Image: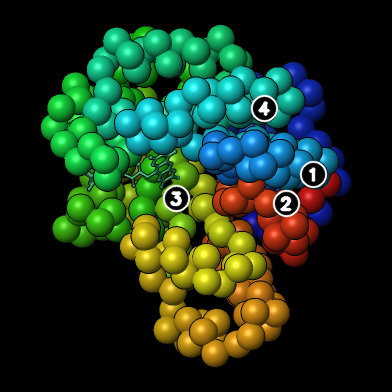
């Protein structure tokens, strides 16, 4: 395995890359992983102020790109698009796009909006039927992320990324099924993947192995969540079906808030270093619209400039 230079002293030459795959390749040539952050559209004005304060702080360390989530069923569409519009002016931006409950025409219009906003790529997702519209998937025209990748390929030249699941998608019987679906998405034009949160390096290496065996050899960027607020991360892990290793779980539950933060941040920093060591092409940090823990993690693995 090549030795990885974690000191990102140099930047990628301005204008030399214009999309995510090229950025990943340029960083790989420098033996460096990419650094990126995920943001979500906040619910109110206080959340909005937090988001932009966090974005400004995180932009200072020159991430290679950022991404912005999108509510399934278009629940927060306007806010998501407004954030994408603004971020894309400053940093290479990936707009997440879900298709559950959507029409082909409506989805094509949003893809056009992303194009006009200057996004680098869309992350093509199915999304899940919202609680207040449990039949959304049945009612919509597009049933899977694969169909969204195909549609995107028809209507835009934007780069397309997709989701990957180190702990297997909750509706899938096994990892090989997910890997087969990932390979179909690659054949349909997807050129990179980003993962759901997970907590062991084995979960990531198992995914890479299964995907590669199925013919999906696109870069798969691990998504990592700073464990600063242990209770919040435990809740989010449960919602996404990610397993926190029993020993870590016990330590987090037994410790007071301050100690739990130290244990959690040390754990996720070491996991991130291990992921880079096994060849992860970058780290996509779920910022939760907060800069402090995201920066601590990025600095802890030596990815800040
Ligand atoms: C990095 C990342 C970002 C995310 N961002 C968002 C976001 O912004 N907004 C949001 O609402 N949700 C988001 N999600 C959650 C995601 O939408 C859900 O996990 C959803 O349940 C599945 O999305 P998908 O794109 O993987 O769907 P799909 O690829 O459609 O997969 C859903 C299920 O169907 C199966 N399947 C799909 N296609 C086929 C096929 N052709 N043949 C057989 N089986 C098939 C899959 O194996 C899987 O079990 C994100 C997830 C990740 C990992």
Q: Nearer the viewer, mark 3 or mark 1?
A: 1
Q: Is residue 269 above or below residue 219?
A: below
Mark 3 to mark 1 CA distance (whole Å): 24 Å
Q: How many marks?
A: 4
Mark 2 to mark 1 CA distance (whole Å): 6 Å
Q: Does the CB distance between marks 2 and 1 fall below 8 Å? A: yes
Q: Secondary structure at mark 4?
A: helix
Residue 213 image position (x, y, % from top left): 29, 51
Q: Which residue is mark 4?
A: 87
Q: Is residue 149 above or below residue 199?
A: above
Sequence-wise first label, 3 or 1 = 1
Q: Which residue is mark 2?
A: 291
Sequence-wise first label, 4 or 2 = 4
Q: Secondary structure at mark 2?
A: loop
Q: Quadrant of ligand 1?
A: top left
Q: Does the CB distance between marks 4 and 1 fall below 8 Å? A: no
Question: Within 8 Å of ligand 1, the CB of disc 3?
Answer: yes
Mark 3 to mark 4 CA distance (whole Å): 22 Å
Residue 261 lies in quadrant: bottom right
Mark 2 to mark 3 CA distance (whole Å): 21 Å
Sequence-wise first label, 2 or 1 = 1
Q: Which residue is mark 3?
A: 195
Residue 63 image position (x, y, % from top left): 72, 40
């Amino acid at each position: 395995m090549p030795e990885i230079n974690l000191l990102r002293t140099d930047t990628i030459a301005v204008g030399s890359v214009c999309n995510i795959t090229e950025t990943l390749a340029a960083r790989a040539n420098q033996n460096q992983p990419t650094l990126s952050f995920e943001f979500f559209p906040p619910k109110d004005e206080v959340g909005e102020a937090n988001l932009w304060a966090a974005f400004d702080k995180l932009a200072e360390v020159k991430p290679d790109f950022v991404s912005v989530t999108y509510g399934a069923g278009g629940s927060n569409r306007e806010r998501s698009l407004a954030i994408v519009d603004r971020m894309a002016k400053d940093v290479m931006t990936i707009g997440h796009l879900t298709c559950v409950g959507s029409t082909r025409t409506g989805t094509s219009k949003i893809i056009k909006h992303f194009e006009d906003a200057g996004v680098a790529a869309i992350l093509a997702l199915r999304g899940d039927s919202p609680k207040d519209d449990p039949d959304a998937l049945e009612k919509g025209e597009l049933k899977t992320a694969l169909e969204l990748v195909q549609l995107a390929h028809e209507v835009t030249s934007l780069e397309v990324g997709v989701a990957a699941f180190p702990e297997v998608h909750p509706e899938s019987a096994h990892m090989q099924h997910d890997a087969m679906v990932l390979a179909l998405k690659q054949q349909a034009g997807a050129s990179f993947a980003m993962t759901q949160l997970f907590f062991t390096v084995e979960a990531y290496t198992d995914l890479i192995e299964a995907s590669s065996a199925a013919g999906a050899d696109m870069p798969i960027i691990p998504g990592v969540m700073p464990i600063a607020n242990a209770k919040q991360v435990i809740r989010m892990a449960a919602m996404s079906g990610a397993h926190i290793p029993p020993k870590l779980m016990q330590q987090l539950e037994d410790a007071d808030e301050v100690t739990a933060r130290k244990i959690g941040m040390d754990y996720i920093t070491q996991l991130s270093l291990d992921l880079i060591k096994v060849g992860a092409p970058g780290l996509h940090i779920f910022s939760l619209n907060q800069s402090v823990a995201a920066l601590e993690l990025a600095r802890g693995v030596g990815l800040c400039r």
